[in-house]
Image (cartoon, grey):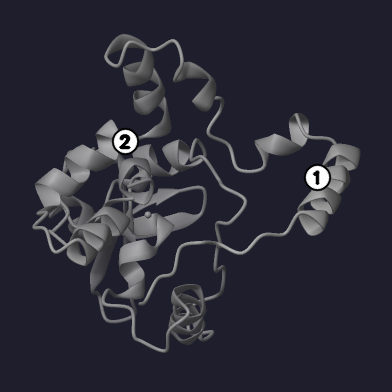
């Protein structure tokens, strides 16, 4: 993963200075009780919490997202690694550190980019090269809203438009009632067929 660089503009008035018993001075930026190293923000390692934390509230939370919340030194790294292996369905270490996935250290754009890694994984499976720049461009082009817009403005639209509704997980429940779902399940049970296609993996 390429090194992330964030906006380094920091107002001196926003810096909180804290001294320890030995006279060492630490500088922080704070928002809503959450603090990050001012030096880390100025160096471009972390986004500025004063501007970034309010934006995180705009993040589109999906039904299959997981948030690991814990106090410091409470076994968060251990639990995160276990969760990662369960989600991967493989007892393999995640290639990145937990901090790369922490809300405090990411912008809304980075957190919503869980597609870039999938794109790169798919390209590897297809034995095709795909660098970070291309993966990010594909991710942007293939966002739900951009695909929906392209369907109408580039692809000639009409027949494709009904395929793009809201892009929300579980939205089918607003159109497919419980009774219809049960009826459909019964139909599938009564009309089982074996696939004529055989695959070897």
Image position, residue 119 (x, y; %):
26, 53
Q: In front: mark 2 or mark 1? A: 1
Front residue (pair 40, 16) = 40
Q: Looking at this view, is 7 or 181 the one in front?
A: 181
Residue identifier under label 2: 142
Label 1, on which residue? 184
Q: Is residue 82 above or below residue 149?
A: below
Local crowd size for mark 2, using a 10 Å CA cut-off: few (<14), some (14–19), many (≥20) = some
112 lies left or right of 177: left
Quick check: can you spot residue 132?
yes
Quarter of the image with the C terminus is bottom left
User: Which secondary structure lies at badge 1?
Assistant: helix
Q: Is residue 6 visible?
A: no
Crowding at mark 1 (Cα within 10 Å: few <14, some 14-19, many 20+): few
Instruction: Determine the residue positioned at 44% across, 69% down.
Output: 198
Q: Marks 2 and 1, how far apart in space?
A: 31 Å
Residue at horizontal 42 percent and vertical 89 percent from the top = 91
Rendered view: 186 above or below 197:
above
In which quadrant of the rendered view does residue 174 lie? top right
């Amino acid at each position: 993963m390429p090194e992330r660089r964030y906006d380094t503009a920091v107002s001196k008035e926003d810096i909180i200075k804290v001294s320890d018993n030995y006279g060492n001075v630490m500088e922080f930026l704070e928002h809503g009780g959450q603090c990050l190293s001012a030096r880390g923000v100025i160096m471009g390692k972390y986004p500025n919490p004063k501007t970034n934390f309010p934006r995180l509230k705009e993040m589109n939370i999906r039904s299959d997202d997981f948030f690991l919340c814990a106090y410091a030194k409470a076994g968060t790294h251990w639990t995160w690694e276990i969760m990662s292996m369960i989600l991967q369905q493989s007892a393999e270490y995640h290639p990145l550190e937990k901090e790369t996935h922490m809300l405090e250290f990411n912008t809304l754009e980075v957190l919503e980019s869980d597609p870039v890694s999938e794109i790169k994984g798919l390209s590897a499976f297809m034995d095709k090269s795909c660098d970070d720049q291309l993966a990010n461009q594909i991710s942007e082009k293939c966002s739900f809203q951009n695909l929906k817009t392209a369907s109408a403005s580039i692809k000639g639209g009409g027949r494709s438009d009904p395929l793009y509704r809201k892009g929300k997980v579980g939205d089918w429940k607003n159109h497919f009632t419980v009774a219809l779902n049960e009826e459909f399940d019964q139909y599938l049970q009564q009309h089982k067929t074996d696939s004529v296609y055989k695959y070897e993996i």
